Amino acid sequence: MAKTETTPATEDKDIDDAGSQLSTAPAEEGGQSVPGSFGGVRAPGALGALAWTWRETTGWVRWFWRQLTSMRVALILLFLLSLGTIPGSLIPQTSVDAVKAENWKKAHETVAPLYDKVGLFDVYSSVWFSAIYILLFTSLIGCIVPRTWQFVGQLRGRPPVAPRRLAKLPAYTTWRTGAEPEQVLAAAEKLLKRRRFRTRVSGDAVGSEKGYLREAGNLLFHIALIVMLVAFASGQLWKSEGQKLIVAGDGFANTITQYDDFKSGSLFKVDDLDPFSFKLDGFEGTYERSGPQRGTPRTYEAHVTYRDGADGAPRKKTIKVNEPLETAGSKVYLIGHGYAPVVTVRDGQGNISHQGAVPSLPLDGNVTESTVLKVGDYRDKDGKKDQLGFKGNFVPTLDLRTGTMLSQFPALDNPRLVLTAYRGSLGIDSGMPQSVYQLDVSKMKQFKDKDGSPFAKVLKVGDTMTLPDGAGTLHFDGIKPWATFQISQKPGNTTALVGAVAALIGVAGSLFIQRRRVWVRAVRDADGHTVVELAGLGRSESAKLPEELADLAVALQPEAPPLPEPDPADSADSSEGARA
Amino acid sequence: MTSIAAAANENMAEISNVLIYSAMAVYTLAFLAHIAEWVLGSRSAVGRTAAALTAPQAAAAGTAAQAERQGGGTAVLERPKVVTRSGAGTRDVPDGPGAAGTSEKGDVYGRIAVSLTVLAFLLHAGSVLTRALSVERAPWGNMYEFSTTFGMTLVAVYLGLLVAKKNVRWLGLPLVTTILLDLGLALSVLYTDSDQLVPALHSYWLWIHVSCAIISGAALWVGACSTLMYLFRDGYESRLESGWTGRGLDRLLAELPSNRRILRFKAHLAKYTDSFVMRLPSSATLDKFAYRVNATVFPLWTFTIIAGAIWAEAAWGRYWGWDPKEVWSFITWVAYACYLHARATAGWKGRKAAYIALAAFGCYIFNYYGVNIFVTGKHSYAGV
């Protein structure tokens, strides 16, 4: 908000008056900030002390408020805001990438606790950052409200009376004409009105003003900023955001228990979840096959069938990276994908103890995945209850010529499953929650080959891994793709968008529209001719004003045709203004 | 894509590379021509200092009197002379004569430089176009493409201002220098073979968001360059008032005690730069120009961020997530807001506001290069 627009300063008080009305800002306070006493004597007695304290308190409060809403403090707060935003981009933020932040903390053990204390891992919700923007917005409101009233007053008021000496104004022109002064003024008023100036005739001059939309835009912009902040804040409070990994063929219903990971704002209630469900029919990914960007994903498409509400009609939709599924009040985004080897595990008795897809987590860009399978319901060849754990990697494109077991390409060109197996307690019976993607082998024993080396096998689709000592088998049935989805529900998005558009219109208006005043005066001189004077006063940076004034003069001249210039002695007066 | 089409595309990509190297060669020639212009101009500029001091009100933006014929030729109207008065505190120093000074030879070199810049621009634009054809999409999928397009837009802005008859020929040398640095960096550090987009970039918002970012950046560069020149010129003009230019500066240097190192350094610096700075437009002109450019771009930059937020909402599921690029675009925005407010605040006008403007542009540049090179975030594509 351009609060303290000083006018093109001149020594003439007249113009100062004209200018001060033009400036829409409250006058800058000077000399008010003397700390301490706010006037008045302290009367004796308790009442006097009370009155004095009251005066002091209100005095300080008023002083503080004036400081806060002053342009200088607003400027400082803006500085602080931009400075305060910086650390959040350099230090990993928990809210943006929790894993990265955790790793950073581990890598910087000495400074991490210190950083944690001052909220450097959650900059944008830290106390100090909130303090900056809350103060800034308070300052903003404290500025907008009086300015709005001022602006309303200006809209209801009339353009100001012409200053006495127009020649002192920043842009000025004059000529003599044979037309009557009244005629000239009437023509000038008509002309200015036609050019959408607001006009006012008083005495021997027409006053006019244009460009009120500049201040309107300015106010709109700043109000829109508040709207955006409120929208953002409400979005944070009522949002819900969860992630779900779905293997092709499986489905999802939008209830909280179905999520793998769920975050919500502090005012969100579980009942607020929109009822809908969808099924992942299939996933397609293509990758760059050649060149330096080999392996870079080119298309990701998840084909789903979804239902609105508890039992809406099933509809088909393809979710892509830039094209989320929009249903009810929620959006479903595609955020990741991988492969799930499908396996059948038989126990020592030959009974199926596990069958199904094992979603594996990608470790690198070529989708080398870590695979973990826990089999809790298992009997060994003697029929004794036990548990099995499998651990290893799924590699979509294995190329042994490279000498590594890492995948060489993200597509399924030469898929292999590399597994080793353990027996013992999985630790899942203790009731402690544990990740399905991690195998705790502290109470397990790895199967060994006959020569005593750890047992491990590389499997193609269709291969079977037979555990030593008839402990059972694992059959690699096939591969299914999986995709992770983010399901978000964020109220306030529309408000934020409306605010953003309003801010844009407002800022454009406040920067591109120039507010200016033009006066036309016509008086009869000693010779009986009419002297026409035009003068303009713009806010700063209104560089086009002289041109506009010249245009107005040209447009006025048919009604007030100029007479030939009189002797040079006369014109000296008009050129006086040129010498600053 | 059939292999024939693929081959054609590879061909196009190669043409694009040849064109960009040719453009760089021509820019280098333009650079040399500009150097010649400035050097030749410095000889003619001697003795202009005094002239500048006593110059009349030439800076007044008065509309020159022109005879204007009304239709039918019955009335001949004199376009009235508008007298302008600048506010108190401005110096009313006239604009400098331009890089070539009064040297005709320098002027010829300057014109050659501009012509070469036009030629280089055509080659440059051809390179960007063939790159776009080779990938069959907007050529802004990675930092290399972004940088070449940025450079092209920068030259386009400069040439556009020249066509609009703005007094910007003094921008030529810094412009060509910047372009050479930009293209050099693009080819050496940021180069990426022509290729298809990652899925996140498949959106029409690519056209809107990135083109706005590029245009904003190019115009902000012009504003920042003008601001920098303003700082030099402002220093020169204030010394002009104290008489510390030319011989006055020599006298000052002779009188200054040797332990006042900073002041001596400044004086020496001034001694060497004055002959250049005196040929620039006046500080008031530069300041106004910089402000108008920055104020014009600010809404566009606002739109760039909003467009980015809308795209982010579609691609990543949130319109604002404090990704480093988002953070720095926000910082840039706030810094420019600071600048606009500072210009309207007593005590912050002039040099202080100029420093803020430069810092704000620094934020833009860090957002452009720094974030992609030093910080990893969601705006990392094709390696950088």
Image (cartoon, helix red, strand yellow):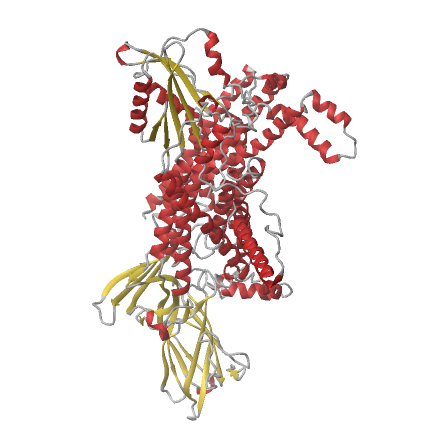
Residue B174 vertical position relative to residue A505 in the rendered view, above or below: above
Image coords of residue A374 (percent x, y): 44, 80
Seen as rendered, the residue at the extreme top is: A567
Q: Position of residue B108 (x, y in %)?
A: 52, 18
Res A234 → quadrant: bottom left
Would residue B379 appear left or right of A199 to someone viewing this image? right
| A9, A288: nearer the viewer | A9
Residue A393 screen position, x and y as percent: 46, 70
Q: Looking at the image, which residue sits at the far front?
A: A44
- Residue B43 to residue A251: above or below: above
**B197 sits to left or right of B286:** left
Is residue A288 something one can see in this rendering?
A: no
At horizontal 45% and vertical 43% (from top left) the residue drawn is B146
**Picture quadrant of residue B281:** top right
Extreme left residue here?
Answer: A313
The image position of residue A249, as x and y in percent, is 30, 70
Image quarter of residue A188? top left
Q: Residue A441: tell me if it is visible.
A: yes
- Relative depth, front residue between B291 and B29: B291
Q: Dividing the image into 4 quarters, which one contains the C terminus of chain A?
A: top right
